[in-house]
Image (tube, rainbow, N blue to C red):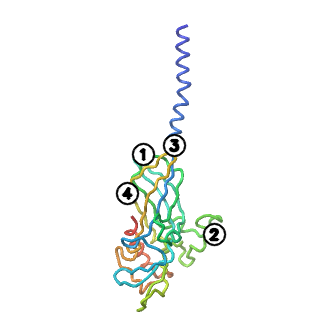
C-alpha cells in the first residue's frame, strides 16, 4: 500500500510538472512589447523642418528641404541573450513628420511583438541588400515594398536607396531657386549602422528609441559635397559623388 501511494504521488508530481515546464518556455518567448523607432531630422544643433531655410555648410547658400525618404533593411536588435532580426526591409518617408515645428517626435516607426528583455544596440542598413537590388520591381508581387517602380533606376539597375530633395540658391542667387535631388543608389551606396542604444522592452508596453539624422553632416561629414556642380544625381557617371554622400551619411546617423 505504501509503495502504491508513493508511486501515485510521484506520478502526480510528474504530471503537474510537465505543463509547468512547457508553460515556462512558452511564456518566455511570448512575453513581448512594442519598439517604436523615432527618426528625427536635425540640421546641426537644431531640428530640421521641411521648407524652412538653412545655410549650406561652408559656402552658406540658402536652401530648404522638400523630401527625405529611404529604404531601411536588416533591422536587428542585440542583447546578451542573442540578436533578433525585426524587419528585412521597409521604406520610410520622413517628409510629412518634419513639416511642422510642433512635431518633436519625428517619424515614428512601429515594430510590434518584440521579445521583452534588455537590449544594448540597434543595427540596420540604409539601402537594398545586393541580392534584392539585383532584381527589378517586376520581380516582386504587387504590394511588396520593392515592387514600386518610382523608387527604381532602370538605367542604373538599382533602387534609390536614400532620397533627399530640396531647393537651393546656386549660381550667385540669394534665394533658393534651383532644385536639387541627391539620390543615392547602386551597391556602392549600401551602408550599415550599429548604434549603441541601451533600452528595455517590457511586456505589453511601448519602448521608444531615438535615431537622429543630421543633414548638415550628410552634406559635410567626411567631405564637403560640391552641390554647386552636382545638384542632381541621375547618371551612372556620378557614382563617385554617390560614394561621397554615402560616406557622409555614415557620420550623419546616430
Of pointers 1 and 2, the one earlier in the residue sequence: 1
Camera-nearest label, 2 or 3: 3
Of pointers 4 and 3, the one earlier in the residue sequence: 3
Q: Is residue 148 above or below residue 5?
A: below
The residue at which mark 4 appears reads as 196
Assign the C terminus to one quadrant of the image: bottom left
Of pointers 1 and 3, the one earlier in the residue sequence: 3
**Residue 11 on image: x %, y %:** 55, 20
Q: Residue furthest right?
A: 142
The residue at which mark 2 appears reads as 138
The residue at which mark 3 appears reads as 29
**Residue 70 on image: x %, y %:** 50, 69
Task: Give the Cα distance between marks 2 and 3.
Answer: 37 Å
Q: Which type of secondary structure does the marked residue at label 1 adopt?
A: loop
> Within 10 Å of the Cα at label 3, are there few (<14), some (14-19), or many (20+) other Cα atoms?
few
> Within 10 Å of the Cα at label 2, are there few (<14), some (14-19), or many (20+) other Cα atoms?
few
Check whether the beta carbons of the residues at disc 4 and disc 3 lie within 8 A of each other. no
Assign the N terminus to one quadrant of the image: top right
Check whether the beta carbons of the residues at disc 2 and disc 4 lie within 8 A of each other. no
**Residue 195 on image: x %, y %:** 39, 59
Amino acid at each position: 500500500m505504501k509503495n502504491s501511494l508513493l508511486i501515485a504521488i510521484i506520478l502526480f508530481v510528474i504530471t503537474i510538472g510537465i505543463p509547468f515546464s512547457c508553460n515556462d518556455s512558452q511564456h518566455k518567448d511570448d512575453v513581448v512589447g512594442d519598439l517604436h523607432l523615432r527618426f528625427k531630422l536635425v540640421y546641426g544643433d537644431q531640428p530640421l523642418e521641411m521648407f524652412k531655410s538653412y545655410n549650406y555648410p561652408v559656402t552658406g547658400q540658402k536652401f530648404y528641404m522638400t523630401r527625405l525618404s529611404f529604404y531601411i533593411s536588416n533591422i536587428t536588435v542585440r542583447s546578451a541573450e542573442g540578436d533578433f532580426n525585426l524587419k528585412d526591409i521597409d521604406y520610410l518617408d520622413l517628409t510629412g513628420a518634419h513639416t511642422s515645428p510642433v512635431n518633436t517626435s519625428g517619424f515614428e516607426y512601429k515594430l510590434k511583438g518584440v521579445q521583452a528583455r534588455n537590449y544594448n544596440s540597434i543595427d540596420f542598413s540604409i539601402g537594398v541588400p545586393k541580392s534584392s537590388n539585383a532584381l527589378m520591381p517586376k520581380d516582386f508581387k504587387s504590394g511588396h515594398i520593392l515592387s514600386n517602380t518610382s523608387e527604381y533606376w532602370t538605367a542604373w539597375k538599382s533602387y534609390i536607396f536614400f532620397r533627399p530633395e530640396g531647393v537651393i540658391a546656386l549660381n550667385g542667387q540669394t534665394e533658393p531657386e534651383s532644385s536639387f535631388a541627391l539620390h543615392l543608389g547602386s551597391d556602392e551606396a549600401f551602408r550599415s549602422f550599429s548604434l549603441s542604444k541601451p533600452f528595455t522592452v517590457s511586456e505589453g508596453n511601448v519602448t521608444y528609441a531615438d535615431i537622429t539624422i543630421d543633414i548638415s553632416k550628410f552634406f559635410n561629414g567626411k567631405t564637403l559635397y560640391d552641390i554647386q556642380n552636382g545638384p542632381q544625381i541621375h547618371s551612372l557617371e556620378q557614382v563617385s559623388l554617390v560614394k561621397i554622400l554615402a560616406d557622409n551619411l555614415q557620420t550623419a546617423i546616430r
